[in-house]
Image: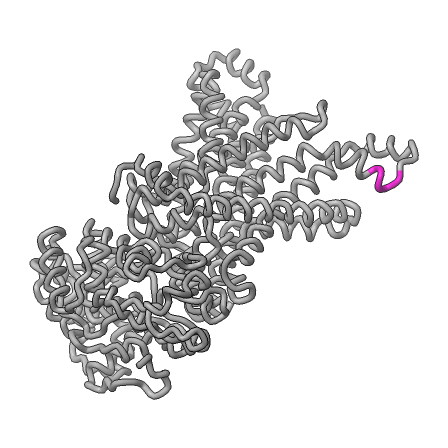
Amino acid sequence: MRYLVEHPERVLQLTADHVRIVGISILVAAAIGIPIGIVVTRLRWLEGPILTSSGVLYTVPSLALFAILIPYTGLGASTAIVALVLYSLLAIVRNTVAGIDGVPPAALDAARGMGMTGRQLLVLVELPLALPVILAGVRLATVAAIGIATIAAVIGAGGLGRLIFDGIRLIDPEPIVAGTVVASALALSADWALARLGIVLRRDLGRSAGEG
Amino acid sequence: MTLHGRLLELNWSRRTLLLASGTLGVTLSNVDRVRAQEAKPTVTIGSKDFTEQILINEMVALLLEDAGYPVERKLNLGTSAIVHQALVSGEIDAYVEYTGTGLTAILGLPVESDPQAVYDTVTAAYEEQFGLTWLEPLGFNNTYALAMRQEQADELGIATISDLQAQANNLRFGGTQEFLTRPDGLPGLQETYDLEFAEERGMDPGIMYQALDEEQVDVISAFATDGRIPGLGLVTLEDDLGFFPPYFAAPVVREELLSEDPAIADVLNQLAGAIDDQTMANLNLQVDEGGQEPRDVARAFLDELATGGVGPATPEATPASE
Amino acid sequence: MRGDPLEFITYISEHEEQFLRLLGQHLQVTLLSVAIGIAIALPLAVVVVRVDRLAKPMTTLANVGQTIPSLAILGLMLPILGIGFLPTLFALTIRAILPIFLNAYVGIRGVDRAVVDAARGMGTSNSQLLLLVELPLASPVIFAGIQTATVQNIGIATLAAYIGGGGLGDLILQGLAMLDTSVLLAGAVPVALLAMVTEIILGRLRRVVVPRGLQIDIK
């Protein structure tokens, strides 16, 4: 813990790098993954190939994926972000599909009865009702990405992994402990915050459903 | 003023305070500094992933900052090839490289032993192939050296790398992953000296010394200017067949940047010939064993350099190998 | 970056001996870590299911443990266990214990109480209950935990290359060091394939090991 006290600026800087890499990755993954998930619920034959391929991607070890990407995306944060996006797709796509599939048929029938078009149905009924499940996918992806991003330091992407490598270089546990504590705290607080958000969403949905 | 400008200013007022309390006689006022800075290009400094590199490139960064350049640090990027790639692609503007590394690992040229010839070769080739300029050497030669524990080397009667040949198959080798693949590393060494070790293990540069000290390996690829060689009672083996080229350190800078602002060369050449092997080993030791921050060690050295007080060795540091 | 992406195949065939040695090291440390992980995590889960007040602290600990970067465990073990095989095995074992423990705990806890009560009503002893009822019923979830741990550890074992632990990570780091694509991919592609193939094989094996009738699809 001494390291945290003695080098707050460096820790803060690396934490900011880390949050930025993970944040961008998750946003991009959501921007790609949610539409893919929606398409899958419309074109069912895509489900097998898409979920299998993102599942296979997920098993590729991070150091290997970074290495495989380097010839194409170079060293640094861009490679880290591409890799994290690929890893995050599985949870986000799968949960989007599950969330939309889980929308009660009664709600759909009612909406159709009100004369909603396909697009209105999606935006006003399916997505809002699927949101808590989609969010759970985002949560899983975020916690995993915070951990994987530590390895991105290998390819010059910065982030909290830098502290761990510093510690290995100097055989000094202090920076390692500092990097670990901050990375764990980030993961746990992201997990907690997204879980809270999910609870709030569910409650609101429950309420509006009760009203409607 | 933009937010960025304000941040710079904040940064600089802090630095000015530090400087005022230090030994450097800087006369520029805070306002002058900020103004001077706005006119000057931002310089991005990189480094490889071991102590000496971080330390020496930190010095380069600090020197530029002292001269009023905004500096971005991308230190600890990785291996030679990675940092070189970053320089060629313009991700960084400068870092300190070693002549022998440029010659063999980057340019893929055969080993040469004359330091001046190596320097001339890399200077010309870098200019032509990459548009990069080598500035003046800093003074020290951080050559690779094979190191062993003193007792074991004595016991087995090994003083030169040639002596290893008969016993290598009983010895375990540890080195950086980079050394295990570089042409001027293990592959070339094995060929020149006909060596076959019992085991070859790749690891992070920082932990080789401890691995050797704790008898988990028997021979390592050390850096000659690493203060831990004397610190841990290690001995380096004589390169009796002259396999390793000289590795004199010098800043390599993107030509584009130098033509934009030629004064950068003068700023960095303040370090020319200022650091000998012994001094470098001592500085490294202050980080590796003394637990000091590279930036603090670099700052202290530059302050000493500015006041002309750089002696051969600071008293608390252990003298480097012979 | 030098080299044609498919040159890594040539590299492997030209360095067959080295490649097989590294592959062997990789498999050895991964399998051993999972085996030790099972030996520790399964009994632990059984105890925690029985002793209720351990449940909360142990599952919290395991969940927090999941957020510790593997590289950090490796680094922290350096001063204690030195370099090479031992710290690698230690870090991988810790990593294996977490998912196996959590899955086993959740699996055993999830066994239908009615089934347990029925078994007790028939006079089964505690150990019979565990071996004949709880473990078999929880086996799909337990096996999924083992699968997760194995596939994940194949990846984490690449990090051993930083601390002299060998394995296919050596080739990845050497390729990175020289920005030589063929060396880099000679390590990265086999590791990726190994992880995928293991995932598939263990998925199939689950269908063999888990009692028919309990086979559910677990991701």
In the displayed structure, would residue C58 be above or below residue B279? Answer: above
The residue stretch that appears in magenta? C125-129
Q: In this view of the protein, which residue sits in the foreground, A203 or A2?
A: A2
Q: From this viewpoint, is residue B322 visible?
A: yes
| Residue A100 horizontal/vertical position (percent) | 52, 24
Task: Identify the residue at image location x=66%, y=45%.
Answer: C38
| Residue B41 horizontal/vertical position (percent) | 15, 59
Question: Which quadrant of the view contains residue C181?
Answer: top left
In the displayed structure, would residue A160 be above or below residue B119? Answer: above
Q: Is A177 positioned to the left or the right of C139 in the image?
A: left
Q: Is A161 positioned to the left or the right of C38 in the image?
A: left
| Residue B233 horizontal/vertical position (percent) | 42, 78
Q: From this viewpoint, is residue A82 visible?
A: no
Task: Identify the residue at image location x=9%, y=62%.
Answer: B261
Q: Is C158 positioned to the left or the right of A204 in the image?
A: left
Q: Could you tell me which quadrant the C terminus of chain C lies in?
A: top right
Question: Which quadrant of the view contains residue C211?
Answer: top right
In the displayed structure, would residue B50 be above or below residue A208? Answer: below
Task: Identify the residue at image location x=69%, y=39%.
Answer: C106
Task: Identify the residue at image location x=37%, y=83%.
Answer: B318
Question: Which quadrant of the view contains residue B37?
Answer: bottom left
- Residue C102 lies in magenta, yes or no? no
- Residue C127 lies in magenta, yes or no? yes
Q: In this view of the protein, which residue sits in the foreground, B206 or C27?
A: C27
